[in-house]
Image: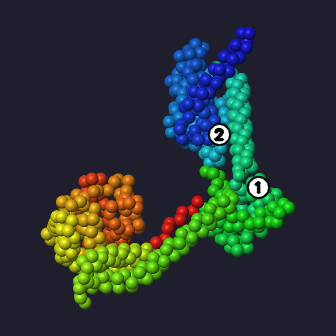
Amino acid sequence: MARSEMRVFGRESWRGLGAYFRSLVHDSARLDALTVARHQSFIASRLLGGLLALCVFPISLVVGGKPSILGAFAFLWLLTPIAIAVFLSRTGRFGAAHLISAANLAGLITYCSWLTGGLGSGLIPWMVVVPLEAALATDRRIVLWSAGAAGLGLAILAALGLLGLVPDAHGLPLPPQEFALVGAATATAYAAGLAVMVQMVHAGSESDVRAGEERYRLLAENATDMITRHDDKGRVVFASLAAQQLLGESVQKVLGDGLFERVHVADRPAYLTALSRCQANNEAMAVEFRVRRAGGAEPARYTWVEMRCRPMRPADGAKLDQPGIVAVTRDISDRKAQEAELLRARDEAESASRAKTQFLASMSHELRTPLNAVIGFSEILNRELFGALGEARYRDYARLIHESGEHLLNVVNDILDMSKIEAGKFKIVKEPFNVASLVTSCCDIMRHTAEQKSLTLKVDIAPGIPELPADKRACKQMLLNVIANAIKFTEPGGWVRVSARVEKGNVVLAVADNGIGIADADLAKLGNPFVQANSSYNRSHEGAGLGLSVVKGLARLHGGSLELKSRLGEGTTASIVLPLDTSLESVEAPLHAPAVSAA
């Protein structure tokens, strides 16, 4: 029981010590398990070596007595590996730490060999350890520098021997032969330990490589997208098992030119172009093409796929034996079907919109001709230009016919304007004109209508408004429509205020009233054709809901906008915002094309 407890205690202590040394590894080295292991072993060996020297020092004092100055300096030198371990832990510079350690070890062996007999010292075999220890850095340059440091130490000892500057080795704790044997034995044991460490690092590297290969193999075999590797000529040298699901063929039939042969003939240039550009420009490419998919008993059919390829890039410090391309290919037939459905729906919507516009334009023209006759003849009857009608009710009927005809003609004109705007055929000609005179003229036209409803029409024109480069006829139509709306939806005894001002480089024509107002739910819908705030058949105000849509369309043709602010029961403010910096040229409404986004 006691032995098992000791084993458990030993394992836990070893794990705790390993965790402590692992915590000393610099953050920059924690991205790779193998790098962490190398840093950890380097730090642990240097710290333990320095601590061992500290433990031996009291024993040396008891056995040998007070050391000489040269001996004390050698002992202090034995503590320098602790500083090197601290350097690596703080900086993470593994190669620099190995170079410093090799130079330090070569210097220490040279110094101790000089104290114990020069080239005849039993510590000379330790020089072999210097390049062996540097081999743990897995860097050929560090090994060569370490071998050079060891050779330099031997050359220094040889030169000191020739000059007779080597002290007598009379203070050795053992006879010369035994001391040489101990030196060779300890050097051999240390070299054996280094060999075991190299083997452990190598085994760890192989284990990590195998684990990485296994992870990538599992990823490639279980991915639903087909993963392929291509050589510099575009031929497939590797294909994942997903090729069988995507193409209905075994992996072997996809290798070489197998994939190319299954690409649709019309799409082969795009396929080859993507691979060649990826290889030549060293950048990722994407291409869509059709591939033939075997269907077993069913005939083969073509499926849309998307291939994203990128050049193979080696890991840091590694080199590729052969250049190549890695590609990921996935089935996009569902997405293509959705895109085709969206395109079909868009074409149908555009066709329906064109048919509606043409129908409205044709019907409007057909209605306008007889309406002009109705309005003209009813006006003649109302004025009794060719004689008295006799009965007073005839005049009332003629007046009602005339008013209804004018209302219907206005609706027809609005439909014509709206259809032209939607079809992109409404042409405006911009020329500078006086804004104040336009506002005054529109108010004079609508004043009689306002007075008939017992409304007060106010005019507020800011001084210094520059001339506005716009289509004067269209601007007059917009302002008249907005004023007419304000009068129509304001109860008797109310007021309508028309104002003009310059604001942030725009001319703002605002029409405010204290009428019935608009609910927030209806405010966002206004400006669309045939939409009114109250769209029920029993509404109390006449109109087809085209006035504001025409105003909105004409304002957009000028690069401006129509802004509406209202509160139910308090009134409405409609602002026509027109820019001052537009060019003086003819502008046509752009054709409306709905935006379609791919699935």
- Identity, as a three-letter code, of the amino acid under mark 2: Leu
Q: Which mark is residue 173?
A: none
Residue 580 pos. (x, y %): 26, 72
Note whether 111 is above or below 275 in the view shown: above
Q: Secondary structure at mark 1?
A: helix
Q: CA distance from mark 1 to mark 2?
A: 37 Å
Question: Is the Cβ of the residue at disc 1 closer than 8 Å to that at disc 2?
Answer: no
Q: Residue at x 80, y 66 (%)?
A: 300
Q: Quadrant of residue 290?
A: bottom right
Q: Residues within 10 Å of mark 2 (few under 14, many from 20)?
A: some
Is residue 99 or residue 204 the one in the foreground? Answer: 204
Query: Which residue in the protein does label 2 denote?
Result: 34
Do we see residue 499 in this rendering? no
Q: Residue at x 59, y 15 (%)?
A: 59
Q: Is residue 385 left or right of residue 134?
A: left
Q: Is residue 546 left or right of residue 236?
A: left
- Mark 2 or mark 1, which is nearer the start of the sequence? 2
Note whether 250 is above or below 60 in the view shown: below
Query: Which residue in the protein does label 1 denote?
Result: 245
Q: Secondary structure at mark 2?
A: helix
